[in-house]
Amino acid sequence: MPKTVIVGVSGGIAAYKSAYLVSALTKRGYDVHVIMTQNALEFVSALTFETISGNAAITDTFMKRENHDVLHVSLAKKADMVIVAPATANVLGKVASGIADDMLTTTLLASKCPVVFAPAMNTAMYEDAVTQSNITKLNELGYHVMDTGIGMLACRDEGAGRMKEPDEIIAFADSVFESLYDMHGINVLISAGPTREAIDPVRYLSNNSSGKMGYSLAQAAVSRGANVTLVSGPVSLDAPEKAQMINVVSAQSMEQAMTHHAKNADIIISCAAVADYTPANVSDTKIKKNDDMSLRLIRTKDILKILGEAKTENQILVGFAAETNDFDKYAKAKLESKNLDIIALNDVSRPGEGFGADTNNIKLFFKDNSEADLGVDSKEILAKSIINSIFEYRLKTTR
Ligand code: PMT
């Protein structure tokens, strides 16, 4: 379930019910932050929400902060879900049109988490074609707009437009959350990027892995609610939001991090391009130029093989196979020899795909002998398909 919930309160008489909503969410252990529009303050005081939630109720985009965060952006990043209740015709219309002119609408525009609207307004306003078209547009854009209740309204009219009861809003939010965050509670460990094997203090052996594939996998798993630990070699990418980052440099440090975190992992994905060889001796001082030189290399440990030997029941282990020829044969051999459940074969012979590129070409082989050709696509889209395949396979095969 979500940890941080923003409750947006806009100006309608149903705002008094939002106090119960905030109270119920707080009792369930959520960190609730209330954002009120100026009109909402005409109905309920900020103090009510502050007292119930234990957090300052935010009413102004330009509220002073102790640190220098941009408040609507930092709150939007932190939120696992936003519930706007009551959502007036005005707020629905603004969000449907991309208008962001106060704290609530700027936060909504900046947030990437699921957003639930519980509309509340007069029946005629609710049934008006403009409101209905805004609701249709919001649903098409991926927002979750609830129906309204039918009954006596504050204006004494009878009909649609009553805000759903707080318990119904929570049940709706739960169902949205469960359908979107179906990997909630699953621990996913992913390795990404290259390793660097030191030759001397300024030189190293490495490869062209950019980390894009592994980071996209981490993002895809985070977006479905998984707890993601990302063990990354040196890359120049931003850490995926909400992933636990472990930065490593060499194959040896990657092996230590992976074996340590594997113990708690339900799914392990080894996407890193780990060096197979490392210099036998690392010079403490910068090596001076001579005519020719040779470097003696020794094998690194095969991290994936170690993880395969230590694999626990119900743990899903996924490897990558970067191949330039005899693709299926080599991928299947790695699936078998490393005791994997799934291997993602990528053809790295073609320029513009695989190492360093924005696209990849993936075929999955499963332990149960099934296969799935995902073809060529962006790494973001492939990552979503790979995570989905792993999740489905886990559902099918674990008890
Ligand atoms: O980072 P990008 O630029 O986005 O590129 C993505 C990628 C091409 C690097 C990625 O999709 C990929 O193929 N990663 C695996 C690269 C690789 O090392 O493949 P391999 O066939 O040599 O290794 C097989 C498997 O064993 C891999 O899962 C690898 O992580 C693992 N391995 C390899 C060597 C080693 N010492 N320890 C390992 O665990």
Image (spheres, rainbow, N blue to C red):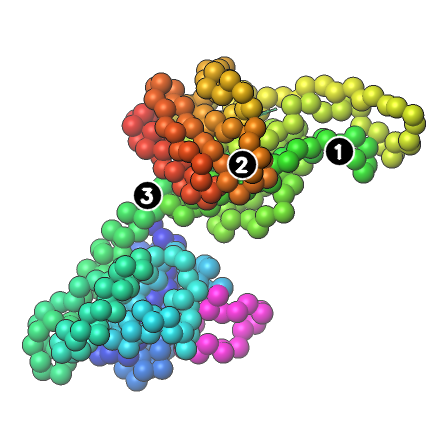
Asked if ligand 1 lies within 8 A of label 1, the reply is no
As displayed, is residue 338 above or below residue 138? above
Q: Residues within 10 Å of mark 2 (few under 14, many from 20)?
A: some
**Comes first in the chain, label 2 or label 1:** 1
As displayed, is residue 19 above or below residue 324? below
Residue 105 position in % (x across, y down): 38, 72
- The structure residue drawn at horizontal position 52% and vertical position 69%, both measured from the top left corner, is 70
Q: Which residues are magenta?
A: 51-73
Q: Could you give the CA–CA distance between mark 2 and mark 3, rounded to whole angstroms?
A: 30 Å
Query: Mark 2–mark 3 contact, CB under 8 Å?
Result: no
Residue 117 position in % (x across, y down): 27, 65
Amino acid type for the residue under numbered disc 3: Asp
Residue with the mark numbered 2 = 353
Q: Is residue 378 visible?
A: yes
Q: Which mark is residue 204?
A: 1
Residue 143 position in % (x across, y down): 30, 60
Amino acid type for the residue under numbered disc 1: Tyr
As displayed, is residue 334 above or below residue 177? above
Q: Is residue 69 in the magenta section? A: yes
Splitting the image into 4 quarters, where does residue 50 fall?
A: bottom left
Q: Which mark is residue 244?
A: none
**Comes first in the chain, label 2 or label 3:** 3
Q: Is residue 364 left or right of residue 277?
A: left
**Comes first in the chain, label 1 or label 3:** 3
Q: Is residue 346 left or right of residue 286?
A: left
Under circle 3, the secondary element is: loop
Query: Mark 1–mark 3 contact, CB under 8 Å?
Result: no
Residue with the mark numbered 3 = 182
Under circle 2, the secondary element is: loop
Under circle 1, the secondary element is: strand
Splitting the image into 4 quarters, where does residue 109 fall?
A: bottom left
